Amino acid sequence: MTAYYNEFDELAAAWLRELIADGLIAPGDVAERSIVDVCADDLKGYSQHHFFAGIGGWSYALRLAGWPDDRPVWTGSCPCQPLSVSGQQRGHADERHLWPSFHALIAECRPSTIFGEQVASKLGREWFAAVRLDMEDLGYACAGADLCAASVGAPHIRQRLWWVADTQCAEWRTVNQPRGKEGRNVLPQKQEGTVELGSGREDGWLGHADRAGSQGYGQESHQLNDATRWKVAERRAWAAGTFINCSDGKSRLVEPSIQPLAHGIPNRMGTLRGAGNAIVAPLAAKFIEAVMEV
């Protein structure tokens, strides 16, 4: 067993175990409890550690990027509810603000590389500024990219902040970084229309894919540089999905096997919740590839 998966949701944890059994993600053990109950001793003996593991998207993305199962790495997409524009936006006052628990484990165990993801809202960007400051205080180089799912051909936006912290990449350290309130680092203004992964590292910023790309589903409207090595085949993979009409008047793409909710049909909510909270693995893989190249 090479991986430790931490996931408090019962349905997602069961999903993880099935994916492990099917060989779709790194072999490992699933700890079905909150991260606040995890201690450093629980993590010994594993190469990969996935917190807020969901349905294993980070492990799957690492494999897509060519990251070996036995290469050390930590991942964690902290809960977005305190920061999402669709929530109450209570930020640090929300009990689901779990970065302090994740940060405490990082500070004690000092993993070499950490990948994470968060919503790209105003609060999400402020959250990442604080995270980067915390990581730099621990001696890590830290950088992020504001990317949308459309940049890998998905027919939806799903704008997210993707970030990495590493002990070996001193060139990512912040130099003349703009400062926000309380002296915290802030992210640069977005750059329209291109993905610049692997550039601009001197300010701790790996790049930005603009929301405008969603209109063209990441095709002609999105100019992609050579460093990311995008493949047309990955865009075509989204064609296997099915659009459903939702009550808010919008159409959304789902896997053909996922049907709309209906009274009396079991397990639909768990399926939709698991899929809805998952990261976009092809995009995560491209971010990981860019980091590996850097």
Image: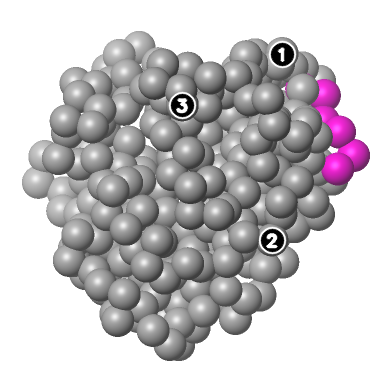
Mark 1: which secondary structure? loop
Q: Amino acid at mark 1?
A: Glu
Residue at 25 percent across and 72 percent down: it is 39
Viewport quadrant of the N terminus? bottom left
For the residue pair 71 and 251, the one nearer the viewer reads as: 71
Q: Is residue 247 magenta?
A: no
Q: Which residues are magenta?
A: 222-227
Task: Specify whether residue 241 is in view.
Answer: no
Mark 3: which secondary structure? loop
Dot 3: within a 10 Å radius of its alpha carbon, few (fewer than 14), some, or many (20 or more) residues? some
Dot 1: within a 10 Å radius of its alpha carbon, few (fewer than 14), some, or many (20 or more) residues? few
Q: Which numbered disc flags the more N-terminal residue, 3 or 1?
A: 3
Residue at 35 percent across and 12 percent down: it is 249
Q: Which numbered disc flags the more N-terminal residue, 1 or 2?
A: 2
Mark 2: which secondary structure? loop
Task: Specify whether residue 90 is in view.
Answer: yes
Q: Amino acid at mark 3?
A: Arg
> In the rendering, which numbered label is found on residue 192?
1
Q: Amino acid at mark 2?
A: Gln
Is 20 situated above or below 203?
Answer: below
> In the rendering, which numbered label is found on residue 168?
2
* Residue 46 location, quadrant: bottom left
> Where residue 290 appears, x then y in whole percent?
75, 48
Residue where numbered disc 3 is placed: 184
